[in-house]
Amino acid sequence: MPDPKLPLSSTPPSGYQQDQRAPSSFNFGRGTIIGWLRSLIFILLDTVLIALSWKTAQTIVFNVRWFQAVGDFQLLGEDFNTPGFLIPILVVTVVTLASAGLYSQRESRRRFARLFQYLTVAQCVILALAYLEDPGLILSRSTFVLAWIFNILFVVTGRLIAEAVITTLRQKGTISRPIYLVGTPRDRLVAQIALKLISNNEFKIVGQLDLSNRHTRDRWADIVQEIAAQGVGEVFVCSWQSIEDPMALYWSLKTAGIHLRILPIGLEVPHQSPKIEMIGGLLTIQFHPPALVGSDFWTKRIFDLIVATGLMIVLSPILITIAILIKLDSPGPVFFKQTRMGLRGRHIKVWKFRTMVINADQLLKELEAKNEIKGGVLFKMKNDPRITKVGRVLRRYSLDELPQLINVLIGEMSLVGPRPLPLRDVEGFAPHHYVRHNVLPGITGLWQVSGRSDINDFEYAFRLDMAYIQNWSLALDFQILMKTVQVVLGSKGAY
């Protein structure tokens, strides 16, 4: 029975599609083309390096006297010098690597153990095919082994260099991939943080769509056309559960040739190398424990101890100089130990170089009205009159935090983690804020390298802490430490 809402005509009305799966035009999606080009570049790179490996092996065997002395230099006679022999070798090797998925996604290209395995498999296939072609053929063992070794060395080195070049170009923004974020404001904020910190500027956010705006929910086709017009090849949906008609969005993107990536941010799941698996039509996200349970945490603890000890020794002349300057600048002790909230709500004494006058706590009550942090949880003030002259310099370069290396050594803090806050600040917490105390506090953290004192909204700072907790890894800690050095030297956002 025809739909009574549609006119009885053989021609559909303008803008109406009889099937949501029908594309508006036939073309290749931007994301697909980029993926093909990327794979083609790595195929060409491997082809050149594999050919170079075999030629290098043959040259060594034919020109080194030791190989000539043992008479091991007959690799298919003169046939090896012809392209007709090298081409099958290249085809077999590249096809073997492709079948192993080593030209697909970024993570697959970096599986060097798998690359070693399948280069070895390809070499065995070449040996078998050569024997089947001519059982009486004498293969040079030396050339075969050398070619295998050079294949591994050249291809692995080539990929490492290629990935380093790609990372450098991404950091400069030369080859960033334009993407579009779709989600609620909170989820989009978490996505921006993760993409900026972890992806080495691989993605460039060219636009965002707010799902809290109801006017956007009923016009997916028009919105997707606008996104496609900006040259976007991939859309990141941060709040899939907030989309009222997800299939309409899915098919609008699909027919426009735009890749869809769903970020389960609203599900509050961790990021630790998940495995996506379908079980009876149900999507599951699986997380595997490490082979040695707790190894990553204890590696972090050992790293903290080694680095903290090393810094205490190396920086001892600077620490002594700072102590002398503090004594000369204003009356009072060199160190300031403040009670703060640590792991699981424990009170800890956090060590700092004193940067304020000795009656700073009493003066705080008079300055509460000038607090520049929204929500009133933290207290920050750019021109705080309680700060001494030396203290202002120490704060600008975060040198006042150096004594917290003592807290790291005694196990109350880590080098990286959510900052421990004064008890005055914790009193203003909402119930959900206390989750930040489930991990060891740190000297530096994601909050500190994302704006430091320039961040004037505690809820935003809390989301940064949550992004760190949910995405924690040893690599992330190292990235934050490196970023901390850049931020401190630039003295950006410090007061």
Image (cartoon, rainbow, N blue to C red):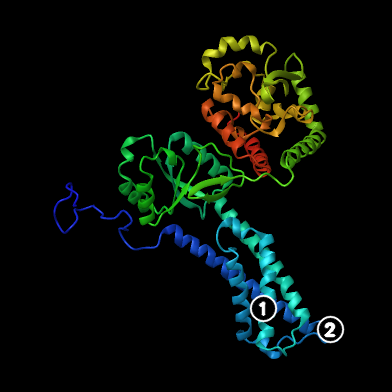
Q: Where 303 sits versus 404, above or below?
A: below
Q: Residues within 10 Å of mark 2 (few under 14, many from 20)?
A: few
Residue 240 or 238: which is nearer the viewer?
240
Q: Where 121 sits versus 260, above or below?
A: below
Residue at 61 percent of width and 47 percent of height: 273
Residue at 52 percent of width and 30 percent of height: 460
Rounded to the nearest angstrom, the CA distance separating label 1 from label 2 is: 26 Å
Which of label 1 and label 2 is nearer to you? 1
Residue 495 seen anywhere in this rendered image of the structure? no
Residue 74 or 339: which is nearer the viewer?
74
**Which element type, helix, strand or loop, lies under badge 1?**
helix
Q: Amino acid at mark 1?
A: Ile
Picture quarter containing residue 127?
bottom right
Which residue is at the far left? 8
Residue 51 location (% of width, % of height)? 64, 76
What label does residue 126 carry, if any? 1
Picture quarter containing residue 407?
top right
Residue 176 seen anywhere in this rendered image of the structure? yes
**Given contact means CB atoms under 8 Å apart, are the residues at marks 1 and 2 in contact?**
no
What label does residue 395 carry, if any? none
Identify the mark nearer the N-term, 1 or 2.
2
Q: Is 30 situated left or right of 9 in this image?
A: right
Residue 257 location (% of width, % of height)? 39, 57
Q: The C terminus lies in which quarter of the figure? A: top right
Residue 398 or 346: which is nearer the viewer?
346
Q: Amino acid at mark 2?
A: Arg
What label does residue 65 carry, if any? 2
**Which element type, helix, strand or loop, lies under badge 2?**
helix
Q: Residues within 10 Å of mark 1 (few under 14, many from 20)?
A: some
Residue 189 location (% of width, % of height)? 49, 36
Residue 388 location (% of width, % of height)? 67, 19
